[in-house]
Amino acid sequence: MQVKSLTQRTTIVRSKLGIFLANLFFLTILFPYVSFGLPVPSDSQPWAVLVGFTLLLLNIPRLKSYKFRPTEVALIILPTMCVLIVSAFFLCEGGTSVMYLRTIFKYVNLFLVPYVTLLYVNEFSVRLFVLSVWIWGTVVIGQALSGNILVGFLLPRESILFGRNFALGFAPEPAYMAKVAVLFLLLTDYFALEAKLSRLSTLLLRVMCVIMIFLSASLTGFLLLIAYVLIALFLRKKSVLRGLILAITILLVFLAVMLFEEEIANFVLEFSSKLGKLGDNIRALIEYKTLLPLLLDPSFQARFGGFLSNVQVIKSGHIFGLGVPSYPTGSIFAPVFDSGIIGLIFVVTILWSFTSNMMHLKQEVLRKYTLALLIMFSLFTFSESLATSYIGFFLGLNFYMTRLDRAGLVKA
C-alpha cells in the first residue's frame, strides 16, 4: 500500500523564501552534527532550531489559525515549564552557563523542531534527501578506503580509531553516523509511502544506508539495523505464501546451524576479524554464547548507568529534579533529572503521542509506520541526546501522520 502526495498543499508555506528555508531546515536534519568549523561546545548543533525559529516567525499570523491537537498543545506547554524549572534552579543554586544552555536547549529543540516539521514536511525536497544520502555514502566510503576523516574541518570533534571502525561520515563518532543511516532508512520508507521514490531508488538508498552502518563497525548501529529489519518484517503485509516461505527459511537456517555449528562458527570468527570493533563483539558473543559481552560493553554500561541515574531522581525525593547538571545527561529520561515530575510527565506525553496516534489512525499503513517510529524513537533516545535535531524530527513525523490520515490518500 502507498500514500500518494497530498492534493492540497499546506496553506502555511507559499513563498519561495518559505520553501527555501524549509529545505534548509531539512538539510540541517540530514546533517545534524555539522558545525561548519565553528566552536560549538556540543555535538548537538543549533542550526535546525535557528532556521526553524525563523520559519515560525515568518508565519505567526497563519499559525494562529492552525488547529493543533491537545497532545501537541501539551508538548508546547510542558517543555516551557521544564525550562522555567531549570532556570529557577540556575538562578537560585547556580551552575555553569554552558551547562545551563545545554540543558535547556533540548527543550527548545523539542519545542520547535517537531512543529516546524509538522508544518513544513510537505515542502521537503525528495531530491535533496537523495542527494544528501549519496553525499554521506560517498564520504563514508572515501574515509574507509583512505583511512582519513576528510571532512574534519566541518565537525565539532572527531573520535575514531581506524582499524576498529572504518568511517564516521559527517558525525563526531562512528555510532552517531550509524544512527543517521538508520534515520535515512526511516525517511526512505516515508518518501516511499508518499510515492515520491521509485522502487529502484528505494532499493539503492537502503543499500547505501546498510553499507554506512557496516562501515561504522558500531555495535549501536548494528543493533539498530537488526531492530529496523525485524520491525520491517513484522509489519509487512501478511500473506499465507510469504508466511510459509519465511517459516521454511527460518527452519532451514536453524537446521544448518545445528548440523554445521562448528564450521559456521569458524567462518564467522574469521570473517569478523575484519570488522573492527563490531567483529570483537561478534567473537565475544560466539565465545560466551550469551548476551553477557553486550551487557558488559563499556559504552552500553555508561548509557545504562545514565538511564538509571535519571529515573532515580524522583525516587530519591527530588520532586522537581536537580536543575542544572554538572555533566550532560542523555536518554529519553534526561528531563526527569533536571525537571523532576514535570519532566516525567513531559516524557510520558511524548511516548503517549505516538501511542495515541496509532489508536486513532484509520489507515493501516500509517499505523504501521507510526509504530515503527515509536520503537525506533525509543531505541534512539536510550543513548542519543534529546537536543539532537532529528529526535524532534521523529516527533514531527509522528504528528504529520494524523494529517495524512485525514487526507485519506492510501491506496492498496
Image: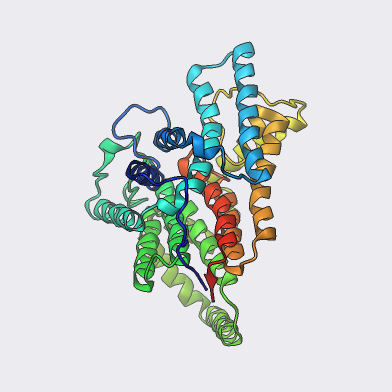
Who is closer to the viewer here, 369 or 322?
A: 369
Residue 41 x/y as whole percent: 41, 27
Image height of 69 relative to 337, above or below? below
In the shown orientation, is residue 18 left or right of residue 117? left
In the shown orientation, is residue 81 left or right of residue 146? right
Instruction: Give the mark count.
Output: 0
Residue 261 x/y as whole percent: 52, 76
Identify the image's colour scheme: rainbow, by chain, secondary structure or one colour.
rainbow
Give the quadrant of residue 195. bottom left
Residue 76 x/y as whole percent: 61, 36
Quadrant of the rendering where the C terminus is positioned: bottom right
In the shown orientation, is residue 208 left or right of residue 314? left
Who is closer to the viewer here, 351 or 126?
A: 126
Q: Residue at x 42, y 51 (%)?
A: 180
Q: Is any atom of residue 222 visible in this view? A: yes
In the shown orientation, is residue 106 left or right of residue 49? right
Q: Residue furthest left?
A: 146
Q: Residue at x 45, y 63 (%)?
A: 5
Residue 343 x/y as whole percent: 67, 33
Who is closer to the viewer here, 183 or 81?
A: 81
Give the quadrant of residue 335. top right
Q: Is any atom of residue 293 visible in this view? A: no
